[in-house]
Image (cartoon, rainbow, N blue to C red):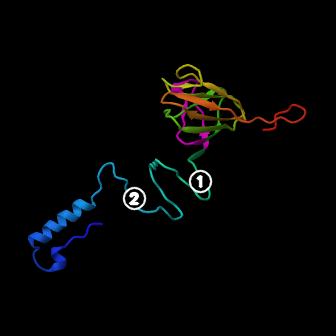
């Protein structure tokens, strides 16, 4: 932090040399674009930020919680009427047969998780101009009752489904 001579602290007008020293100290201590700024350590029980970007590693000690919605109501019978998903984890608890939800705008590395906790088949729509796997623009994929779907953005316009590990018992019945 820059060291400045203040007129109020000094009790008299600053000399030309003191004014020049103030400007020199401010110029030396300023942040310039491209510098690696260090602002301290984040700590405490809760740290809130709208956006946190890092070019290195981010280590989280303990647990971390991603945004979640536990009571999504699916709607509509097409992309325009589908309920917009706004969180990382989305649990759909209300749905009529073939009603839908629509994904957020795709971006590389963006992940979203959907759990269909209803007794109805659910449609999951990408936005217009975006696709899921090799499907068409804005074309939905089905999510059966009691099943979940995790998607990851592989670019600005393409979502890919991540295949879950499916476990069967010795009689061939799916157990997860």
Rendered location of residue 53, percent (x, y): 45, 48
Instruction: Return the residue at label 1.
Output: 64
Quarter placement of the C terminus? top right
Q: Earlier in the sequence, mark 1 or mark 2?
A: 2
Rendered location of residue 59, percent (x, y): 55, 54
Instruction: Return the residue at label 2.
Output: 38
| Residue drawn at x 16%, y 79% as measured from the top left | 10
Q: Is residue 73 magenta?
A: yes
Q: From this viewpoint, which residue is outermost toward the right?
A: 171
Q: Is residue 78 above or below residue 86?
A: above
Q: Is residue 10 above or below residue 24?
A: below
Q: From this viewpoint, which residue is outermost toward the top?
A: 136
Q: Is residue 1 magenta?
A: no
Q: Is residue 59 left or right of residue 163?
A: left
- Quarter where residue 168 is shown: top right
Q: Which mark is residue 6?
A: none
* Range shown magenta: 70-89
- Quarter where residue 91 is shown: top right
């Amino acid at each position: 932090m820059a060291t400045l001579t203040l007129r109020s602290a000094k009790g008299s007008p600053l000399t030309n040399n003191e004014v020049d020293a103030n400007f020199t100290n401010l110029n030396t201590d300023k942040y310039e674009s491209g510098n690696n700024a260090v602002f301290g350590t984040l700590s405490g029980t809760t740290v809130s930020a709208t956006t946190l970007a890092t070019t290195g590693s981010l280590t989280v000690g303990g647990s971390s919680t991603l945004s979640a919605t536990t009571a999504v109501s699916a709607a509509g019978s097409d992309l325009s009427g589908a309920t917009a998903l706004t969180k990382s984890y989305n649990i759909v608890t209300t749905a009529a047969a073939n009603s839908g939800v629509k994904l957020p705008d795709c971006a590389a590395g963006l992940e979203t998780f959907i759990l269909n906790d209803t007794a109805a088949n659910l449609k999951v729509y990408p936005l217009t101009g975006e696709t899921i796997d090799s499907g068409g623009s804005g074309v939905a994929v089905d999510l059966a009752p009691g099943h979940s779907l995790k998607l990851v953005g592989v670019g600005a316009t393409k979502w890919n489904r991540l295949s879950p590990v499916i476990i069967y018992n010795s009689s061939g019945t799916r157990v997860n």
